[in-house]
Amino acid sequence: YMAVHQHVPLAGGMVFHSPMFSVSLYDASEKVIAVKDTSDMFDIMIPLLSNNRTKNEQMRYEAQAGCKYWDHNMNMFSDEGCSSPQHTDHYIVCSCNHLTMFAVVQNETGACGDGILEGQFEQCDDGNDISGDGCNSDCEVESYWSCAQDNGNSQPSVCTVSTVPAFTGAIVHDSNDLQGASNTISVRIFISAPMREGSVVTMSGFVGSETEGSTIDLAVNEASEGLVPNISNWNQTTGTLEIALERGAQVSDTMKFSFVVTNPMHDNEGATVTVSCGNCLVKEPYSTLSMGSISKQTEVLKISYEAPACTNTSLFGADCAFYCVHGTVVGTKCVCPDGVFGATCNQVATLLASDHVLLNPTTSNALSISGRRSNTASFTIPEGAIAADDLVEVTMNLWDVAPTPDAALQTEAGGIIANGIAVVMAPRGQTFLKDITLSLPYDSAAVPTPSGIPTLSTWEPTGHWLDKSTGIWEDLGGSINGQFVDTQTDHFTTFAVMAEEKFPTTMPAFTTALVSDETGLPGVENEVSVRLIFNAPLKKDAIITVSGLLGAGTADTDALAIGLETPSGAAAELMPTAKWTQATGAVEVTLARDMTREEQLKFYFALTTPASDNAAATVTVSCAGCLKVDDARSSLAMASLIKATNVLQTEAAVATCTDSTKYGALCESTCAGVVVGSVCTCAPGFFGDDCSVQGAVLQRTSRVIDPATQSAATVVATADGQGVSVPVGAVTGAELVEVAVKLYSVAPQPHAGQGLLPNGRAQTYGPRGLAFAQDVTLLLDYNAATHDTALYSVNGHWLNRTSGLWEALASGSVVNGLVRSPVRHFSMFAAMLTPIPTTTTTTAEPTTTTPPTTTPPPVIARDQPEDDDDDSSNIGAIVGGILAAWAVIVGAAVFCIYKRNRQGAAAPLLPKQDPQLEPTGQVVLEQPRTPPQPATETAHSAAPIAPYPVIGAPLHQTMMPQPLVLSSQNVYLGPGFPQTIDPNYANSVGLLNPSTSPPLFGMPPPMFASQSPAPMYPYGGMMPGTSAQPMMMGPSVMPPNINFGAGGSVPPMYNQPQFGQSPPPMFGQSQPPMFGQQQNFGPNWI
């Protein structure tokens, strides 16, 4: 049971800090149980009475108060068995081993002001609790006093002034040094001793002011309200101001006020200001003691007088043509007073805010001191910016106008206009040991724009300060930070953001011109690309001239078609006209709109390449009248850029055939491109063996790579992802390189003899001839839906324009629907399909491997035996092959035989290295096997022909009367072999074998070791029941007889049919004619 008691026991010398509490324990019969000496403590929280204690009383309470209980036996308070483990301002926890009555009490041994010095709690005790007499109300010795116990601690302390009280500091500064102008003098006085009400503080030294009268108004800072009056005595002659305190001042008080006087109209030295106060101290007998005075040398009222240059003192300027509205004319300048701005002092401003910060280096531990941001302005003063013994009161005044500079005085090459409000920092002339930072307001919407004509310059907002001695706003620089311009300075004055017209430090010019073309093929339409990078904006109607493109076959025109890549958009929107002059090789493009310096110009046009030998063009890029600073200044010309290129560099094409449009082994095919040697070479955008298929450019893109700054792989790709990834280090040298990608609408058709199927659309890369120091990765167009990936593999290929062949790139991979292939040079590229080899097993019943029903690429099945459903037909075919082989001896028959077989579609051949012939580089062309069909009763039924010819050893080019040209009807023999063998020619004459064939056209001795071939069909294939051996064309001597197996032998040169007749039947079976009956090879045929 706990009870709170209204009364407490009478206990002398005790101070109660809580009510009295009793805690008792009762049994079931309500009898009190005595509880004492328990092993566990009882914790009792006792609330405290009011804690409104003085500093000295609190010190005594913390040392003396505690939890105590009333000992009924001893009739007194005791703390035996109790402790106070927890003290707060509101309660104490009593921890006791017994239950009784408890309270928080304090032994009262003394008090501050009783005249008895208690050293534990008091520094002095003068017998009262009044401050200002040396011993304050908490019995502490006051500043500038000393106290002693002359008669011992039991007597009051005796206190005396040990140091004369003084003003510890005074800050005095004014707002301007303008002759005859109103000048605001700001004062802050620091007090070091209590001052009585009515004390008169005297400030003297303001000599030279033009202000008359006996009184002056004071603008009192709110911190000094009630202490400093609004009106004080003024004595112009002595320059003295007397301020009578309206109340007593404490040490913590500061006198802060300002007043306005008129500056002298003559030269005047800065004021040495003295602050003093007589009869200022509070307590008797020291009431007549004066405060120690303080003197401070200032720039206040310092004037350097300069008479107005004009008779009328309100006019200024070199010719006295301008009126100084609210300012003072100093020499030839109009100088504005506080709160007035503008070149003619016509901008009267309103004070938006005024912030004050006192800087005391000896007491500030901060790394920097920042004035609070007020109406979008702030300042930061770093540690060490002011001297250690200096006090500085920083004032920031914000005015609501953007001060207008005097354009006639400004020295900038361009214009300058006000952008932000005026910020005046005081004290004026204050300098710093380190730069301070100002954040000045900035209005982005007020920065000038070129008004439809981009100028050579740009308007950049920076911080400026006003040099009042010259009237010029000087540029501080700075950087934009949101809606502020951060700038630095080492002194105080008037600041504002000005937008200044800035010019490049170098002559405006085309800094880079990247000029390239697509082909060096003579006499074809050639696309020339031009990318221009410039360091100044270009104006509308500017004419850019690209000259030096000499030798082009394009006639003069005022409407040269222009394509535009950068900036994006239709070319007509930027360059609606282009003029071409053939004599000077100049293209002139006219801009239909302005262009900024951040833009790049990438355009392209078509010119016909020279038909004869032509040197590469040295291109000059120039632009007259492209730049315009403003309407008052003349146009400027861009500096020309001269660049050596390989553009339009051509060599005249030399064709093997008399007719330069013909190509092929016997000049039988017509080329829609240009015949170079014996190869039909296509102009850009054309494809196919005869270059008759034209493809459209679907997508194009390009990027500039700077080897000096490239830090990561550069991907140049179309919108669909086709392109190239160029790693760092692939492009070397100091020149910029523009990598260009074009995606065409067609899949290029490789030569049929290459055994390739087209898949992806053609892609060209430029600049042509570019080689890389390391692999770049092509991203080639690929269509997986066109084939069974189990039957065909895909890889990137490049077009070798010298041979007309598509050559495989290093093995690539398919990633995200694109074929990725490495390469180190640029050309035309495409993804091609190659059949995956299939293997069949010979069993009692021959197995046939059938190619896909689509256009069949070669299927490797070298060891598959032919079906032998018609042996007689096969024997007849062998005889026809022998006869055809001998026919090649007669040179005149070659052309006719070739022409006959051109009528059929030649099938592609797939080269494969024969491991038996690796030392010689022999290439064997694999062929798919098609079972021979049984002969029909028709006299013209053809002998079974394998769909793809088998051709072996290479021939020297001297074997033929004239070189044969690879085309879609030719056979690819592999790298390193002369490409002069026509598969149709092979079909016509049968298969040649080193061991069975006579020399052809005086061929040299056998180049390869003879092998024992299996008997062959005259059009390819093998005799049933014989082993499969590679068939080779090459020099050899045919033996007198050919063994046809069980059927016997047929002597050479016998049983040869006359021209137009069917061969005689072998083994009783009829054979179809070897050649069409309509053919006429002449009167005799061997």
Image (tube, rainbow, N blue to C red):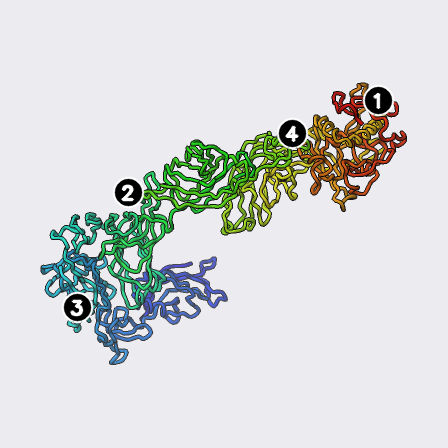
Instruction: Identify the residue at the far bottom of this view.
Output: 151
Amino acid under label 3? Cys
Tell me if label 1 and label 4 are in contact, CB under 8 Å: no
Q: CA distance from mark 2 to mark 4?
A: 68 Å
Q: Which mark is first along the chain, 4 or 1?
A: 4
Q: Which mark is first along the chain, 2 or 1?
A: 2
Q: Nearer the viewer, residue 297 or 198?
A: 297
How many residues crowd around disc 4 within 10 Å: few (fewer than 14), some, or many (20 or more)? Answer: some
- SS assignment at label 1: loop
Amino acid under label 2? Ala
978 shown above or below 18? above
Where does the image place residue 859, in percent across and percent down from the top left? 73, 34
Q: CA distance from mark 2 to mark 3?
A: 66 Å
Instruction: Identify the residue at the far front of this view.
Output: 1083
What is the number of the mark on residue 1070?
A: 1
Q: Which mark is first along the chain, 4 or 2?
A: 2
Q: Identify the residue shown where x is 28% and y is 78%.
A: 153
Q: Quadrant of the C terminus?
A: top right
- SS assignment at label 2: loop
Q: Identify the residue shown where x is 83% and y is 26%.
A: 1056
Q: CA distance from mark 1 to mark 4?
A: 36 Å
Q: How many marks?
A: 4
Instruction: Give the labeled residue for mark 2.
Output: 632
